[in-house]
Amino acid sequence: MATEDDVRRTCLSFAGVTERPSWGRPAWFAKNLMARMWEDDVVTVKTTERDVLAGSEPETFYWTPHHDQSLQLLLVRLDRVSDEVLAELLQESYVLAGGRG
């Protein structure tokens, strides 16, 4: 099971990523927001595969009406995602947020 510390460690391993609060929650930024803790065990990432992921595993991947503003925003339940998939999502999110991929 992935944790907020795993998210933090992975995000901060990317060149130029910084951590600062966003809406009172931990968040990580490349040029733009790349990931943010939405709830204690849920992280927001950016992906081009939002519909596919949420459609195939809605118990793990989803979004709320708040996230309808951006078709790239996806919520990920950390207790349901593998470390490998989380790392891949954070890598993609880093690139989409302006990081050097």
Image (tube, rainbow, N blue to C red):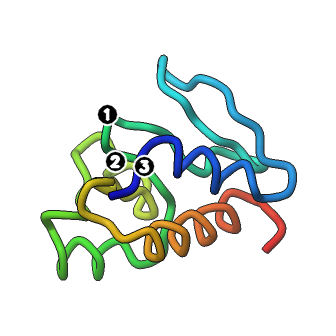
Of residues 68 and 63, which is closer to you in this image? 63
Q: Which of these two is toward me, 4 or 74? A: 4
How far apart marks 3 and 1 lie (CA) works out to 9 Å
* Percent of width and height locating residue 9: 64, 49
| First along the sequence among labels 3 and 1 | 1
Which sits earlier in the primary sequence, circle 2 or circle 1? 1
94 with respect to 89 (left or right):
right
Locate residue 87: give its quadrant: bottom right
Residue tagged by mark 3? 44
Question: At 44% across and 68% down in the image, what residue appears?
Answer: 83
Ranked by sequence position, the earlier of labels 2 and 3 is 3
Q: Residues within 10 Å of mark 3 (few under 14, many from 20)?
A: many
Q: Amino acid at mark 1?
A: Glu
Q: Which residue is mark 2?
A: 67
Asked if the residues shown at circle 2 and circle 3 are in contact, with their CB atoms under 8 angstroms apart, the answer is: yes
Please give the residue where the numbered disc 1 appears in the rendered image: 39
